[in-house]
């Protein structure tokens, strides 16, 4: 069902056995992402050889991905001694060791007959004097950025032992116009901000888009019918569909991990909100909570067995976990302040949240039993974390006092590597896609 | 604003336009709230939307993270209910709003709860429930835009909007 994330690169990508030298059991160069403080790994990313500028462009995207992760420190090309003229032979490792490049990336991009792009790359351990990875990919030229992101993911995975997250997209809400009459549009872009496009025209307020884990589809909330409700949108065709036929406002949607259900809040006539699921095949709806409170922002554990959500049943908004059938709800947040927008990590180990305390907003993580709360960033207004598919990085939106509007940021789990994501306008409600297929 | 230039010859008309302009401002500034407070009592036609907005007061305010109808709001809603009973042809939409100091989804729910509390109070004052519907805008439609409490307190509100029929 779920194909390798490479196969949809319009054309197949090949693991090229002939490129893969025998690997040492354990390379010298590696990054332990579980260490408290990670010293970025010095890496040299050379321009890939090509007849046109494509080799340099692909290498630049690879280098930017690695740099933004905070785990790599790409070395200035001006320091390079060896000029790679034949990427099929081993480089002069000494030339790279002397500029302290612990890892080296070389490659070549050629245009095949028929127009498709062939990109080969090799990752070298300069101190061991060995090749760590050699792969080649074929794609249509229009997909050159995806080729670059897949190469960056391959390097990241080989050197950290963790899956990468560069071949991914972000869906979010573009904000324009004055604050009291904000125009909000669905927008989508690559994880690095490239290939930006709008998915709605701004006539209706749209909020909280979330990716399907299995299809090119998002669920979101829109005011287009006058009654705010949850919709589905096919990203490629633009086809929209109302989720369910509920009497009141539906909001705070997310997909189940198998992509078969949407879980969301339904407003009751008495002003309280409860959590429901709708099966997208059978259209059957199931009520999961029935308390006289606000129950919202549900998010499934990756195994689908539990759900984390926000509730003010105890008087203030706090984070609760219940079983997938709604049984055994228990509060897990006990710190000082209000907690909301819980999101279960794709690795299953942590829950990210927004915390309001002392007049400020923080983004933090806690274990799934609520222990070991850790605040990653605090500010005037920031909320809505979303996980990179490898569970190592969070994206959220932040509005600084007097700034006029929010912008997207990422922060890694160490809390040390924070980056702003460029968008054409103000931006909020980001959601990170799974690794593309 | 074009109309002001066209109507400046008539003092009566000027007074009316002034109150209209202030009614428009009320949805931006929210202070002051009623025509009585700004000394324009009686400027609007009885039974008109202008009268409701300016003389009666179309909105009530809430404490932080609360949907409890405060004493000052009860007085406003009692006036609204009396007026709405007097002019029964209006249908009503109650908009619930939250300030920016909460997260988006929770604030949608909070705005909905404020709209429901406002509706329920009007029902208790004799306004037919069937005339009213509610909608929450969460923190999507602030009336006051600044980054401190002077604006947030204006944005935590429920607004009674008159639809169709009527005057």
Image (cartoon, coloured by chain):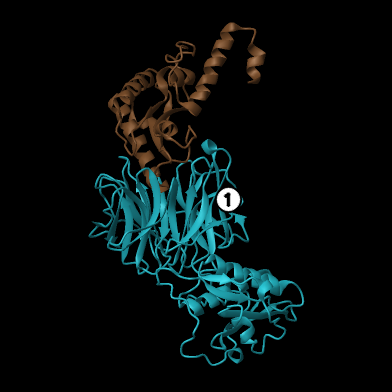
Above or below B148: residue A120: below
Residue A247 percent across, percent down from the top left: 38, 45
Residue A102 percent across, percent down from the top left: 55, 79
Above or below A408: residue A368: below
Q: The brown chain is which one?
A: B
Above or below A429: residue B130: above
- Residue occupying image coordinates x 36% and y 68%: A348
- Residue occupying image coordinates x 60% and y 80%: A104
- Residue occupying image coordinates x 41% and y 49%: A251
Above or below B21: residue A72: below
Residue A25 lies left or right of residue A319; in this view the side is right
Q: The cyan chain is which one?
A: A
- The residue at which mark 1 appears reads as A200
Pointer 1 chain: A
Foreground: A87 or A173? A87
Residue A235 percent across, percent down from the top left: 56, 60
On the question of residue A359 being in view, the answer is yes
The residue most toward the right is: A51
Q: Which quadrant: the N terminus of chain B?
A: top right
On the question of residue A248 being in view, the answer is no
Residue B100 lies left or right of residue A20; in this view the side is left
Residue B133 lies left or right of residue A159; in this view the side is left
- Is the residue marked by circle 1 packed among few (<14), some (14-19), or many (20+) residues within 10 Å? some
Element type at mark 1 = loop
- In this rendering, the count of numbered labels is 1
Foreground: A107 or B2? A107
Residue B37 percent across, percent down from the top left: 42, 15
């Amino acid at each position: 069902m779920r194909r390798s994330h490479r196969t949809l690169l319009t054309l197949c990508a090949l693991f090229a056995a002939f490129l893969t030298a025998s690997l040492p059991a354990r390379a010298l160069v590696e990054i332990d992402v579980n260490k408290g403080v990670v010293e970025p790994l010095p890496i040299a990313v050379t321009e890939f050889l090509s007849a046109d500028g494509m080799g340099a462009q692909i290498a630049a995207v690879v280098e930017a991905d690695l740099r933004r992760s905070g785990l790599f420190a790409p070395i200035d090309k001006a320091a390079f001694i060896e000029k790679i003229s034949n990427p099929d032979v081993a480089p002069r490792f000494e030339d790279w060791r002397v500029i302290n490049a612990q890892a080296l990336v070389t490659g070549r991009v050629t245009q095949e007959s028929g127009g498709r792009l062939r990109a080969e790359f090799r990752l070298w351990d300069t101190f061991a004097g060995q090749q760590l990875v050699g792969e080649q990919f074929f794609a249509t030229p229009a997909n050159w950025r995806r080729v670059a992101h897949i190469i960056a993911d391959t390097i990241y995975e080989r050197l950290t032992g963790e899956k990468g997250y560069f071949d991914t997209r972000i869906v979010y809400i573009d904000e324009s116009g004055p604050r009291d009459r904000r125009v909000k549009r669905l927008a989508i872009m690559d994880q690095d901000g490239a290939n930006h496009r709008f998915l709605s025209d701004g006539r209706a307020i749209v909020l909280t888009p979330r990716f399907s884990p299995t299809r090119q589809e998002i669920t979101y909330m829109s005011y287009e019918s006058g009654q705010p409700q949850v919709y589905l949108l096919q990203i490629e065709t633009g086809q929209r569909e109302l989720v369910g036929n509920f009497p009141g406002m539906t909001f705070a949607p997310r997909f189940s991990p198998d992509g078969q259900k949407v879980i969301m809040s339904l407003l009751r006539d008495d002003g309280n909100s409860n959590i429901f699921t709708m099966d997208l095949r059978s259209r059957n709806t199931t009520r999961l909570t029935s308390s006289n409170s606000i129950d919202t922002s549900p998010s499934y554990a990756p195994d689908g067995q539990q759900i984390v959500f926000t509730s003010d049943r105890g008087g203030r908004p706090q984070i609760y976990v219940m079983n997938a059938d709604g049984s055994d709800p228990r509060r897990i947040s006990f710190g000082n302040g209000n907690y909301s927008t819980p999101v279960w990590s794709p690795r299953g180990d942590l829950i990210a949240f927004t915390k309001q305390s002392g007049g400020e907003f923080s983004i933090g993580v806690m274990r799934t039993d609520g222990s070991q709360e850790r605040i990653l960033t605090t500010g005037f207004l920031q909320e809505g974390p979303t996980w990179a598919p490898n569970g190592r990085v969070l994206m959220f939106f932040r509005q600084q006092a007097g700034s006029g509007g929010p912008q997207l940021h990422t922060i890694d789990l160490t809390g040390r590597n924070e980056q702003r994501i460029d968008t054409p306008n103000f931006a909020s409600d980001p959601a990170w896609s799974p690794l593309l297929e | 604003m074009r109309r002001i230039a066209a109507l400046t010859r008539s003092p009566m008309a000027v007074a009316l336009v002034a109150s209209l302009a202030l009614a428009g401002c009320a949805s931006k500034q929210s202070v002051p709230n009623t025509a009585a407070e700004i000394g324009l009592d009686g400027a609007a036609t009885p039974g008109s939307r202008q009268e409701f907005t300016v003389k009666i007061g179309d909105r009530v305010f809430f404490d932080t993270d609360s949907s409890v109808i405060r004493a000052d709001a009860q007085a406003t809603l009692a006036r609204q209910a009396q007026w709405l009973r007097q002019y029964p042809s209006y249908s009503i939409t109650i908009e619930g709003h939250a300030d920016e100091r909460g997260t988006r989804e929770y604030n949608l729910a909070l705005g909905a709860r404020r709209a429901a509390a406002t509706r329920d109070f009007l029902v208790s004052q004799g306004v037919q429930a069937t005339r009213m519907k509610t909608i929450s805008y969460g923190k999507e439609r602030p009336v006051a835009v600044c980054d401190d409490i002077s604006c947030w307190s204006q944005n935590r509100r429920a607004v009674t909007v008159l639809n169709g029929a009527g005057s």
